[in-house]
Amino acid sequence: TAAQRAGERTALGAEIVRGAPAELRSIDPGPAIDAVVASKGSIRRLQADRTLPREVLLDAMNASLRGVDLPHWVGLSGVDGVPTGVARWPDVDSPLRPLGEQQVRDELFGAALEQGLAHDAAFVAMSGVRLAELDDHDYRDAQFLAGLVEGRLHLMAYALGAAASGMTFRDSDLEGLLGEDVAGLLWTCVGVPEYRTRRSGAPGSPADVTIVWPR
């Protein structure tokens, strides 16, 4: 496709700006990065009746978006001290769409094709762009950056004692959900896990796992 061919180049592009170090609010240093990588997974069940501390939301998102200028929205349904609704990051205290907790969960559930993780998450990070403002190469860049943020957010969630999973969504629901006409890129559901993923094994010695089905 044209978007795929737009990535063909004969020279390297500019290096991605690293950005200033994120100022973290949590005073707990947490586990070492190797331990986080070994223990993280893609959670299948979250607890809708449990909330996450405000600093988990702020630290996870600030670290994940370090050096990345890509629009993100957050569906907020279970973060202590943060109003429920749909907010444009970083303005989580002033949601674009102030909504009750159950309505946020129901709308995320519907837009995620009725997958329970979107309903049960404490917050859902959602990236999106206006296609009219991008050429094919810009769109590839946006997809790459969205993936970078998702990978960081996944690690940060586990480092901070939460859990995360990527999530599919229905594009046609985004304008009503976000309050803006954008094309979605990636969703990440973050919340309180119902179980803990098992630490991975060493090379050649994989860990035994139990399949957990989503609700």
Image: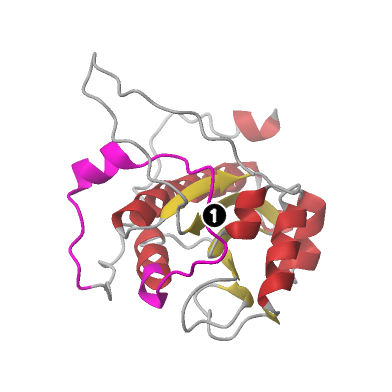
Residue 184 visible, this orientation: yes
Quadrant in which residue 173 is drawn: bottom right
The kind of residue on which mark 1 rests is Cys
Say if the magenta span includes residue 92: no
Say if the magenta span includes residue 43: yes
User: What residue sits 31% from the left and 60% below the top?
Assistant: 160
Quadrant in which residue 18 is drawn: bottom left
User: What residue sits 50% from the left and 29% below the top?
Assistant: 211
Which one is in front, 112 or 50?
A: 50
Residue 185 visible, this orientation: no
User: What residue sits 30% from the left and 24% below the top?
Assistant: 207
Label 1: state its secondary structure: strand
* Image spot of residue 130 (x, y percent): 69, 59
Work out which quarter of the rendered image holds the N terminus and state it: top right
Question: Pointer 1: what residue?
Answer: 189
Secondary structure that dominates the magenta span: loop
* Image spot of residue 54 (x, y percent): 41, 76
Which one is in front, 142 or 153?
A: 153
Could you classify mark 1 by the number of other residues whose Cα lies within 10 Å: few (under 14), some (14-19), or many (20 or more)?
many
Q: How is the image coloured?
A: secondary structure
* Image spot of residue 109 (x, y percent): 72, 56
Which one is in front, 54 or 182?
A: 54
Work out which quarter of the rendered image holds the C terminus and state it: top right
Quadrant in which residue 197 is drawn: top left
Residue 23 lies left or right of residue 122; in this view the side is left
Judge whether 53 appears above or below 150 on screen.
Answer: below
Magenta segment: 27-56
* Image spot of residue 19 (x, y percent): 31, 63
